[in-house]
Image (spheres, grey):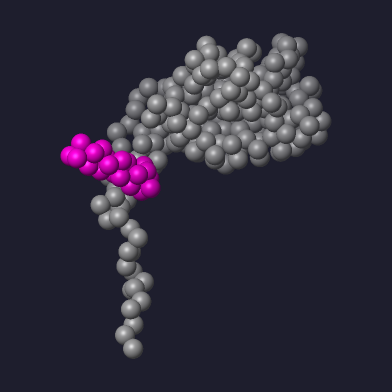
């Protein structure tokens, strides 16, 4: 009886033209950008004394000290997702900032055991694809939360899931500030504490990952399945023109 089984090292389902070996030259020796890393920061509360905003502003100061260019998006006036067209000024502002960024920081209060609706609405307005451009894919992400009571990690865990869904590179470290009302002075500056130290740690790590990855983003997010799909679309267009 003839054995018709395929050898283990054969790939009958693979489209060879779209399968590419890893290129160390591109991965390790990409030209280095010299501009300051561009970081977008989102926070999840509209309160006048918003601790997620205060923590975000404190993190922004650290990032600027480390050499980043930082922009903080104010969610006030952002409509609920899908309640207005995407050309709404606040939606356009948010999407343009996301496209501009090379890394992001998301900081939410924990409310009812989860992130706030304000935080989720901002992320929901960011599409996976926008005119052929992915406004979040390949960007680095740091996640933070502030708590009204004892320390929790519900919000940061949810933000990690969203970051992965948005195809972002979420750094390992994170920040969760317990009893945030005790951690800021009357001027809104964060007091010295292990919580402050952790925010410094997280921003340092975000900068390192952003500097390592930003010049390689296109290569790191270049996928076999998408190359295959693009090739099939080109083939269809060519065949249609030849009919």
Q: Quadrant of the N terminus?
A: bottom left
Q: Is residue 173 above or below residue 207?
A: below
Q: Residue furthest bottom?
A: 1
Residue at 78% x, 32% y is 112
Please state if 81 lies on the left or on the right of 220 as rendered: right
> What secondary structure is the stretch in magenta mostly built from?
helix
Q: Residue furthest left?
A: 242
Magenta segment? 222-243
The one nearer the camera, 212 or 158, is 158
Q: Quadrant of the C terminus?
A: top left
Residue at 78% x, 21% y is 181
Q: Is residue 169 magenta?
A: no
The one nearer the camera, 1 or 40, is 1
Residue 227 percent across, percent down from the top left? 33, 44
The picture quadrant where one finds residue 60 is top right
On the question of residue 181 being in view, the answer is yes
The picture quadrant where one finds residue 156 is top right
Residue 74 percent across, percent down from the top left? 60, 15
Residue at 65% x, 38% y is 158
Q: Is residue 229 above or below residue 111?
A: below
Q: Residue furthest right?
A: 149
Please state if 225 lies on the left or on the right of 54 as rendered: left
Q: Is residue 233 magenta?
A: yes
Residue at 56% x, 36% y is 163
The one nearer the camera, 216 or 224, is 224
Q: Residue furthest front?
A: 243
Residue 45 percent across, percent down from the top left? 69, 20
On the question of residue 55 being in view, the answer is no
Residue 82 percent across, percent down from the top left? 58, 23
Question: Number of labelled discs?
Answer: 0
């Amino acid at each position: 009886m003839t054995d018709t089984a395929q050898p283990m090292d054969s790939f009958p389902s693979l489209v060879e033209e779209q399968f590419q070996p890893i290129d160390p030259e591109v991965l390790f020796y990409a030209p280095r950008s010299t501009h300051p890393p561009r970081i977008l920061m989102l926070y999840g509360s509209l309160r006048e004394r918003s601790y997620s905003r205060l923590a975000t502003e404190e993190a922004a100061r650290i990032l600027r000290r480390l050499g980043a260019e930082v922009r903080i998006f104010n969610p006030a006036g952002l409509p609920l997702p899908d309640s207005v067209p995407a050309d709404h000024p606040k939606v356009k502002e948010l999407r343009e900032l996301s496209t501009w960024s090379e890394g992001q920081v998301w900081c939410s209060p924990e409310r009812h055991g989860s992130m706030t609706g304000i935080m989720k609405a901002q992320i929901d307005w960011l599409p996976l694809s926008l005119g052929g451009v992915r406004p979040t894919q390949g960007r680095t992400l740091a996640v933070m939360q502030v708590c009204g009571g004892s320390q929790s990690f519900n919000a940061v865990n949810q933000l990690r899931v969203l970051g992965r869904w948005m195809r972002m590179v979420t750094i390992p470290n994170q920040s969760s500030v317990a009893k945030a009302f005790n951690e800021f002075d009357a001027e809104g500056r964060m007091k010295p504490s292990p919580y402050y130290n952790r925010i410094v740690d997280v921003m340092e790590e975000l900068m390192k990952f952003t500097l390592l990855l930003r010049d390689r983003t296109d290569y790191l997010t270049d996928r076999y399945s998408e190359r295959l799909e693009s090739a099939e679309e080109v083939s269809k267009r060519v065949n249609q023109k030849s009919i």
